[in-house]
Amino acid sequence: MASMMCLAYIGLWSILTWAWILKYGLRKGLFASLLRAGWTLPFLTLLYPQTHMKTLPLGAKSTLIQVLIDDSESMKGHQAQVQKWIARLKSTCEKTGCQWVLHQLSHIEPDVKRGISPLYRGWKKWKQNVNGQPWVFLSDGGDSFSEVPFEAKGAQEGSEGIVIGIGKTPPQSLWIESIEPPALSFDSQGVSLSFQLKREEAPQKSETLQVQVVEGEKVQVSQNIVFPEGAKDQQFSIELPPFLKGTHLLTFRVLPQKGQIFLWGNERTFSLETMPNTLGVLHLLGAPSWDGRFLRRYFKAEPKFDLVNFFILRDPSDIQDVQEKGMSLVQFPVEKLFTKELPNFRLIVMQNFFLSQFLEPQYQENLVRFVQEGGSLLFIGGPRALTQEDLWSSPLQKIFPLRMVSAPQAYDESQPFRLRLATATPEQRALATVYEEWAQQEPFLSRMEGMTGLHRWQKNALHNDSVTPLLDAELASGERVPLVVASYPGKGRALWVLSDSFWRLALASSQGIPRSLYQDLWDKSMKWLLRQETQQPLVFHSVEIEQRSEEKLHLRAVLYGPAIRYWDATTWTFSVCGVVYPLDQFVFHRYSAGDLEMEGDFVVPSIASGGCKVQLRGTHERFGSLSLEKMVPIETPHFDRDLPDNPEFMRKIAKQAQAVFLSADAGSEATFDKWILDHGSDREVLPTIRSRAVQEVYWFFHSHWIWLVFLFAFGEIFVRRYV
């Protein structure tokens, strides 16, 4: 084919040359024809392309914007506005090069098809699957459960989301913006309840409102508050009376005002846990010591501890020349303590205590059973502790965190050591959060000098499956041995301190160690032992109970925490309203290693008015035992058709997500366009990853010879016209 094209070119050029010679003469016609060949011959190179290797990029990846549209019944009257925003999104994405995908609320929450609008719940589910992509949420804000989103602490700022609220809030609107119930209360003390109220318009005169706190049908508190003139939001607080021990489900409400037609935000339900005013602590000290004196002073300084303290001043084997009744010492009531009174204590402290000498095997069994069934133990070593009798043939071995590979060594009172933070796995640290508290004090602990007295145990003797090492003792040789260990014996918790020298931390100000360090370490340790730590291994992130019929309830609960990875239906129990239900009747969804959602329907013989107690219990050697309790209101959802527009609800969602909020009123389009320009026009060009052979047809025109083509073309024109 190329050869035939070349022959055709030669034939055509020969005919044209003969014609120009006849027209212009031999010299002029031949010169012009040669110049014509000079600028036309390069076009024959199109028939002979060059082949070379070329590295190609994979291409460009357009930004994908996720869009959630509320398609519930109340949105039927806003279809024109919805289509307007979708059309604007489409046209703006065509300009910026972004793509978008549409999701509907009914695809995420099937309840929408039966006239229910779980708006906030559906948005949370959908948001978990966005995976950091830009997103748009459009709704009128009508939620069938009237669930006001809480403001998440520590939420990531700069969330790539935009929330569009359709409709207009009625002018006479008043709602509870936030409520801050106390974390817990004590049975003999009142507590303060803080709350914030907001309204759509600010009247030019003050307004008196009545607020109530109700439990069941009983009004616990009723108080008038004054909303200042010209204010749209205001912070208030009221005092709650003392409650009995237990969990209380309370309702906070603002009574409706004259002309108020929108009551969606006038009530909020919350639970309040009331604990005993004091916590029973039994402190057994084997012999007077500085460490015992400092620890006893710590417990005495804390009003929340009801301390029962016994000092062993003489051994049973001591020789006495008088009768027992003539002694001034109080006899150790071992039988009463370890049979009848043991359940009344929350924490037992055994410090430098010769267990086998003062407790018979049956009392030792009671002590071990107390811990295994959920009690707390603080064990501090010393010259009289952890003898061969205490460990080799004692029930204490069942809960001791170190393996007995040989007979225990005697306590070395003169052994010097340095404090070093122990190495723990991320899993161990997540379950025993007390590790993080000790780790914060590591700069002070590591500079401490003068520590002496130690139970020496090899580091490889630790039961790693059920313990978290907190501190190591570094010897002069560089060897590290366990010093402080947290463990989970059965359902309980225990802290093992293998030295009696920690009192020295309170007197080390000359070494740059604050005196408060001793107090802080025990404060954090006691919170963990008594299960009052801030970061629990498992918590109810949210629990919802919906009444579907007279006896049928629907439950949805989200659990969060590192203990979730050990979820086992055979060792966990779940109860609602006092009835235990098998876990196989629930549907479980895992969103991450520490996030679990459970959902299911169940029949309750008698549904309590107002709410139900939900309980979850689990056991595992990694965390001991867990017991979660929560009073949950039983909600009867409103039908979506009865819900008014509530764009303020959408504003709250935007606030929680750290997203942009737009009202669907005129004037918001420019902000919307700018948001898409900022988040949708960003294209990610993927790196060069492959090469291939490419045929270059126009290779001649990419070379410097192209300038000769222009020269010959202008030369032909000049010869034919002027020569």
Image (spheres, helix red, strand yellow):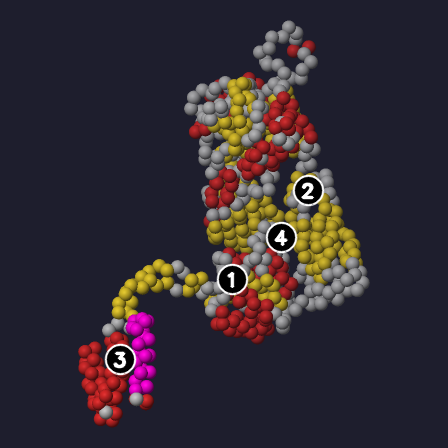
Q: Secondary structure at mark 2?
A: strand
* Residue type indicated by callout 2: Ser
Q: Is residue 202 visible?
A: yes
- Judge from the rendering whether residue 320 lies leftward or rightward of residue 206; answer left or right: left
Residue contact at pointers 1 and 3, CB within 8 angstroms:
no
The answer to if 78 sits in the magenta stretch is: no
The quarter of the displayed image where residue 151 is located: bottom right
Q: Secondary structure at mark 4?
A: strand
Q: Secondary structure at mark 3?
A: helix
Q: Earlier in the sequence, mark 2 or mark 3?
A: 3
The residue labelled by disc 2 is 185
Residue occupying image coordinates x 54% and y 51%: 557
The residue labelled by disc 1 is 134
The residue labelled by disc 3 is 38
**Closer mark to the observer between disc 1 and disc 3:** 3
**Closer mark to the observer between disc 2 and disc 3:** 3
* Residue type indicated by callout 3: Gly
